[in-house]
Image (tube, rainbow, N blue to C red):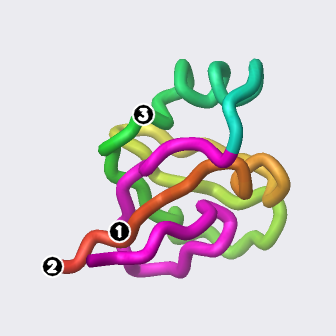
Amino acid sequence: MSKIIKLSDIVPNKCYTVAGFKEESDYSDKLHKMGFVKGTVIKLAPVKTYDPMIFQIRASRIALRKKEASQILVEEIYE
């Protein structure tokens, strides 16, 4: 069983799935519409930047500030 962490705490070269949101809000609705849907695979894009963080989700790259990313909960995928 894997641990649920904030998206802002993920590490490079590992894959995660979206587990939900820290709290439901208008912003979480916007993130949901952007593709942060429960079960969707997400990983840190191979770009050297600290804030904003750039994520690979489906066929897109999305940049989020750490504060925004901390609202999204993810679970590591173990292969």
Is 15 on the left or on the right of 62, as rendered? left
Type of the residue with mark 3: Val
Q: Residues within 10 Å of mark 1 (few under 14, many from 20)?
A: some
Residue picked out by circle 2:
79
Circle 3 SS class: loop
Lower sequence index among marks 1 and 2: 1
Q: Write down the quadrant of residue 52 in the picture.
A: bottom right
Q: Are marks 1 and 2 in contact (CB under 8 Å)?
A: yes
| Residue named by callout 1 | 15
In the foreground, 47 or 1: 1
- For marks 2 and 3, the one nearer the N-term is 3
Magenta highlight on residue 2: yes
- Residue at image position (76%, 19%) is 26
To which quarter of the image does residue 67 belong?
Answer: bottom right
Magenta stretch: give its range. Answer: 1-22
Q: Are marks 2 and 3 in contact (CB under 8 Å)?
A: no
Secondary-structure class at tag 1: loop
Report the amino acid beneath label 2.
Answer: Glu
**14 w.r.t. 58: above or below:** below
Q: Earlier in the sequence, mark 1 or mark 3?
A: 1
Screen quadrant of the N terminus: bottom left
